């Protein structure tokens, strides 16, 4: 029975951590862009904007119904085939695009549910005193919808961080990609992937603590 090479595992930690910023940057960029796109899609769905509503439904259906890896390949390999000007898309850009589109489809439905979940009597009261739809969304609906949606959106962000591990299939040397290269060079695959799993687990645990803190802050006004 082979014994784990602990010295190799400890020495691998600083090597892999050098690529952690790229992993977090891709996830953060994808989250910001996905949140903007998801809010737009959710508002279109709630207001049932003609034509755009059908497009939003098709968009959500496609990106929820196909694997993320397939979508990454479409952006990285497929788009340059359709438009030669898109050959400049690199693995990082394609990954961010894939994360944005894929997770915005899921987030849009969560945000839409949160908006619909706001008590209708409040919206009727706001409209009765002369608020416009824009004022209603900004002052009444969105603040309450945010409190409802935050736990789900944080879970999607955690999933997005883990999903960045697929970027190595596009040639991106991020956290998972660096572990793959180190393992291929040493043939110590188990040790390398155990360490990368521990690093991912640490990130998730830290962000889970942040999620619980945000939930407590947002719910504090409602628990009195």
Image (cartoon, rainbow, N blue to C red):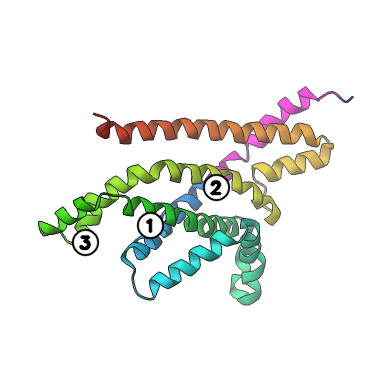
Mark 3 vs 2, N-terminal side: 3
Give the residue displayed 59% in from the left and 60% down from the top.
Answer: 94
- Tag in front: 3 or 2: 3
Up the image or down, 24 lies above or below 8; here it is below
Q: In which quarter of the image is residue 51?
A: bottom left
Residue 4 among those drawn in magenta = yes
Q: Name the residue under label 3.
A: 133
Q: Which of 51 and 39 is in front in this view?
A: 51
Residue 17 among those drawn in magenta = yes
Q: What stretch is highlighted in magenta?
A: 3-24
**In the displayed structure image, the side of residue 157 where residue 175 appears, left or right:** right
The label on residue 160 is 2
**In the displayed structure image, the side of residue 117 where residue 162 appears, left or right:** right
- CA neighbours of label 3 inside 10 A, class few (<14), some (14 to 19), many (20+): few
Give the residue displayed 10% in from the left and 56% down from the top.
Answer: 129
Asked if disc 3 and disc 1 are in contact, CB closer than 8 Å, the reply is: no
**CA separation in Å, label 3 and label 1:** 15 Å
Q: Is mark 3 on a helix, strand or loop?
A: helix
Q: Quadrant of residue 37?
A: bottom left
Count of picture labels: 3
Quadrant (top left/top right/bottom left/bottom right) for the C terminus: top left
The label on residue 39 is 1
Mark 3 vs 1, N-terminal side: 1
Give the residue displayed 55% in from the left and 47% down from the top.
Answer: 160
Q: Is the magenta stretch mostly helix, strand or loop?
A: helix
Q: Quadrant of residue 171?
A: bottom right
Up the image or down, 12 lies above or below 44; here it is above
Q: Which residue lies furthest to the left in this view?
A: 129
Quadrant (top left/top right/bottom left/bottom right) for the N terminus: top right
């Amino acid at each position: 029975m082979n014994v784990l090479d602990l010295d190799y595992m400890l020495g691998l930690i600083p090597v892999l951590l050098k690529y952690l910023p790229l992993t977090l940057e891709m996830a953060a960029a994808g989250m910001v862009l996905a949140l903007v796109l998801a809010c737009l899609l959710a508002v279109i769905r709630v207001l049932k904007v003609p034509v755009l509503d059908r497009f939003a439904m098709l968009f959500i259906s496609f990106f929820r119904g196909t694997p993320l890896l397939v979508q990454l390949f479409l952006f990285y390999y497929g788009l340059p085939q359709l438009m030669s000007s898109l050959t400049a898309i690199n693995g990082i850009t394609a990954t961010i695009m894939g994360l944005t589109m894929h997770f915005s489809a899921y987030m849009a439905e969560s945000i839409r549910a949160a908006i619909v979940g706001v008590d209708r009597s409040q919206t009727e009261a706001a409209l009765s005193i002369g608020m416009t739809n824009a004022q209603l969304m900004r002052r009444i609906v969105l603040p309450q919808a945010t409190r409802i949606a935050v736990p789900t959106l944080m879970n999607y962000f955690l999933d997005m961080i883990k999903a960045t591990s697929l970027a190595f299939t596009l040639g991106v040397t991020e956290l998972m990609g660096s572990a793959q290269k180190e393992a291929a060079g040493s043939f110590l695959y188990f040790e390398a992937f155990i360490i990368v799993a521990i690093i991912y687990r640490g990130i998730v645990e830290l962000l889970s603590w942040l999620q619980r803190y945000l939930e407590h802050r947002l719910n504090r006004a409602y628990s009195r």
